[in-house]
Image (cartoon, helix red, strand yellow):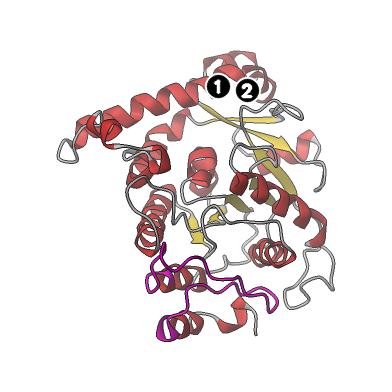
Amino acid sequence: MKTFSQLGATAAVVVALVGLRQFNFADDAAVAPADETQLAVAPQAAVIAQAATTAVPPDDGKLRIICFGAHPDDAEYKNGGTAAKWAKLGHHVKLVSVTNGDIGHWNMAGGALAQRRTAEVKRAGKILGVTTEVLDIHDGELEPTLAYRRKITRLIRNWQADIVIAHRPWDYHPDHRYVGVLVQDAAFMVTVPYFCPDTPTLKRNPIFLYSSDRFQKPYPFQADIAVAVDDVFEQKIDAVSELVSQAYEGGAGGSEERLSRVPPEADTKGRRAWLKARWMRRQSSEATKYREALIRWYGEERGRGFKYAEAFEICEYGRQPNNEELRKLFPFFD
């Protein structure tokens, strides 16, 4: 079997015609289909087509950032503000959902949900000014296999990434943890010529970063970098508002009772205000928790004044930047 990049968009048509449940175009490795009684068939082709048509940015000297989230909302939630700031400066940002999110709802599942969540992140991506991609891997079934390591390696190489962001390998959800492991395992392999020789190697290892989390074992998140997102906070709320199945309906943890507490869809202003209040608490908590990092990067006066933030930890397996390089990669601090 050829690689996904070689087959291109034609593969999506073939998958739709033969009615296959799922393909994983990674070094001849096919993933065993899931239980057919649980998941729909045809809508998966749309998810594959989305991945097949993702464009590579031009070689224009701008930064290239790729962010991996486990599900179609994770990268937007954790990195959306910083992604918008990079995009405003003309840098190229790609948000990748490593699974298709097809069980991430309390009241629907399968291909219909995968399609819905792919459409949601595409709309959110347009608001943030970024590229999005959703891989055709079942939600809840991600494993740190060689095939998926190759897939992640190819994505990083094809984007020619300067910065790679992912969950830490100690997050609450197995898909989150394994995204962290897979990206961590790719941190050196992206430079090895005869690993995935069908894609050009990177001349130097990118900087690999972890998104923030609250977990303490084996060690707590360390905020090496904190980015104030006050100036793009409204933009991030607009993007998150598009993730209706998660932000309003509660995803896998939702219920009829929870939904009854959310303003109805017809009440556009009330609905957005409800969501904004939740995110004000969430992002202000990040700013408070990582205040020292904000002060370190922005200075005492400015660092103490910011309300909202996103934070990142440097993974020790990638390139180790000094502060001067970090200021170039995060050109927001001056």
Is residue 92 found inside the magenta-colored segment of the image? no
For label 1, count other residues whose C-alpha is less than 10 Å away and answer few (under 14), some (14-19) or many (20+): many
The correct choice, above or below, for 288 with respect to 211 in the image is above
Q: Quadrant of the C terminus?
A: top right
Residue drawn at x 45%, y 52% as measured from the top left: 129
Residue drawn at x 37%, y 34% as measured from the top left: 234
Q: Is residue 88 left or right of residue 278?
A: right
Label 1 SS: helix
The correct choice, above or below, for 94 with respect to 278 in the image is below
Label 2 SS: helix
Camera-nearest residue between 235 and 146: 146
Amino acid type, callout 1:
Ala
Q: For the stretch drawn in magenta, what is the main secondary structure?
A: loop
Residue drawn at x 40%, y 71% as measured from the top left: 46
| Count of numbered labels shown in the rendering | 2
Say whether residue 334 is visible.
no
**Residue for badge 2:** 294
**Residue for badge 1:** 287
Disc marking residue 79? none
Residue drawn at x 67%, y 26% as measured from the top left: 297
Say whether residue 204 is visible.
yes
Q: Quadrant of the N terminus?
A: bottom right
Q: Residue 93 at what x, y percent from top left?
A: 55, 53
What's drawn in magenta, residue-wise? Answer: 16-44
Q: Does label 2 or label 1 sit earlier along the sequence?
A: 1
